[in-house]
Image: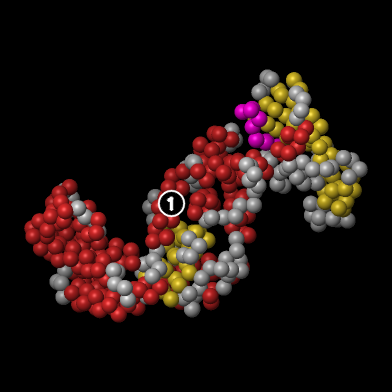
Amino acid sequence: MTGFTNYEEMFSQSIGLKEPWKVDKAEFDEKRKEVHIYVRCRKTAKYPCPKCGKMCSRYDDEEKERVWRHGDVVFFPCYVHCRRPRIKCSDGIHVVTAPWARPNSRYTLLFESYAMLLMKSMPVENARKIMRISHTSMTGILKYWVKKAVKEDDLSKVRAICVDETSFKKGHSYVTVISDALARRVIDVEKGRDTDTVISFSNKLEKKGGCCNKITQYISDMSGAYMSARDECFPNAKQIIDKFHIKQMMLKAMDEVRREEQGKKQSRKRNAGKKLLMIPEAKQTEEQKTAIVTLSKKYPKTGRAYRMVQQIDDMYKCSDMSEAENIFDKLIRWLRRSRLEPMKKVASSLKSKKQEILNYFYYRMTNALAEGINSMIQSAKRRARGFRTFEGYACMIYLVVGKLNLSCPNPFS
């Protein structure tokens, strides 16, 4: 071992030591290429009881020396050593909590804070390699701080929510993501996509200072489970059916018409026009517009279905509800007499939810936030390789798009 000087103040500030804690010595292990910091405490001092917080006199020291991993020193791993004092309180003898680490952790607070900072911006596996710890330890740090922040999250100001679903694993495995439409952040992640998921959120909302009766807007797709949950949990909220979901329904019906008209073999070819017809009119080039006209002449049923889809876009360009309602009614009549079975089915669905669809023109709120968050979630899922549980997946969603107020200290402050 080779010692070095002028270290006490530097390491004391790095670990966050205050009286009666003090750095006793620091050594560099040349063989292992590690830095070791040894901390001691004043024996005559009083320490807070980890159970009740009462200041108590020192009883003795714990039998075995504890070791915590700290941030690297000039790229060498650094470890903090200490035999913490034990105090005698009215309910027994307890080991004092070290001020540089949370209870039951083998890492210092600043080490964990830096780990959280890395996981926000890169794959967990890459962050793990930089920190030189196991995947289990890395995810343990993530889960602790995220769960703590979620538990302490204040939802008292939530007034409008977006309810959307996103995939968890391959196959039919989904989670429900609930966002604050005004704060533009995820406030809850529930396993599944049924009524119980929204009911579970409503219970959490009440526990975290929110009020179900104060929710005034509820944006979702046309899922029966989500809509019935709104009636049960948020009686004062106006249902707004997401306009992007309406457009998606129309596009799927149009594609069914295209495939039926073109036949199975032709509809799968690159020149069948599937992607071309999905491009919004406002984003089409002149060449694309010409190609759509040609395609519509060749396949007239597809052309009619395409024009119906365009009318949905025209409706959402309206500036007031009465104008939109007029276009909506005309579109429903057109769909019903179109003699195109997929479009007629859409007409029945839209007609039954007319008011919920038109509510958009009063509140001007959509699930665009949820859709944007969903894309960020999918990106986060790719970065969180190794998470096989819902719990880990939910923690990553909260970390990336939850805008949580993490209570771990800033390593750069």
* Residue 279 left/right relative to 226: left
Tell me residue 215's x, y (percent). 50, 73
Query: Is residue 105 located in the magenta-colored stretch of the structure?
Result: no
Residue found 40% across the figure and 52% down from its top: 375
* Residue position for label 1: 376
* Residue 214 left/right relative to 90: left
Residue found 13% across the figure and 55% down from its top: 290
Question: Does the image show residue 165?
Answer: no
Position above or below: 389 against 346: above
Question: Does the image show residue 243?
Answer: yes
In the rendered view of the protein, which quadrant contains the N terminus?
A: top right
Nearest the eye: 173 or 149:
149
Residue span colored magenta = 64-76
Tell me residue 241's x, y (percent). 37, 70
Query: Is residue 70 located in the magenta-colored stretch of the structure?
Result: yes
The amino acid sitting under disc 1 is Met
Query: Which residue is outermost to the right?
Result: 44
Q: Quadrant of residue 346?
A: bottom left
Secondary structure predominantly adopted by residues drawn in magenta: strand
Position above or below: 116 against 303: above
Q: Quadrant of residue 256?
A: bottom left
Position above or below: 306 against 133: below
* Residue 275 left/right relative to 377: left
Circle 1 SS class: helix
Tell me residue 229's x, y (percent). 46, 72
